Image (cartoon, grey):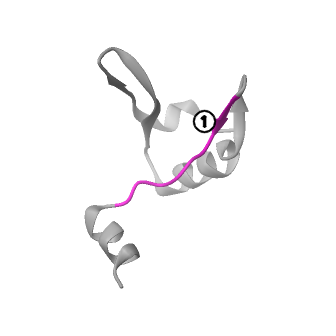
Amino acid sequence: MVDLREVTDARIQFREGNNRRFGFIGFKTDEMAQKALKYFNNTYIHTAKISVTLAQSVDQQKEKYQV
């Protein structure tokens, strides 16, 4: 289980008042972020599947998709 005392911030994304069905959660340590990813990824809230990924900097994204 994830210790909620380790969460530093949380934000749900909205557009024109509608939930965009994704958000961001910050953790105090990389270790806690990894634990949250492992615990929550591919789980469900009611019928909505949760997919968890770690945030990447713009440079990391560029490296990933560079040919």
Q: Amino acid at mark 1?
A: Asp
Label 1 sits on residue: 3
| Quarter occupied by the N terminus | top right
Q: Is residue 16 magenta?
A: no
Q: Nearer the viewer, residue 28 or 20?
A: 20
Q: How far across and how far down the image is residue 12, in percent?
A: 41, 27
Percent across and percent down for residue 55 are 41, 54
Residue found 29% across the figure and 18% down from its top: 16
Dividing the picture into quadrants, the one containing residue 14 is top left
SS state under label 1? loop
Q: Residue at x 57, y 55 (%)?
A: 34
- Front one among 50 and 29: 50
Locate residue 28: give its quadrant.
top left
Question: Is residue 55 magenta-colored?
Answer: yes
Magenta stretch, main secondary structure, is loop
Residue depicted at x 57% and y 47%: 52
Q: Position of residue 33 (x, y in %)?
A: 52, 50
Q: Is residue 21 left or right of residue 16?
A: right
Label 1: how many Cα within 10 Å (few below 14, some 14–19, many 20+): few
**In this picture, which residue range is highlighted in magenta?**
48-56
Residue at 40 percent across and 74 percent down: it is 64
Left or right side of 7 for 52: right
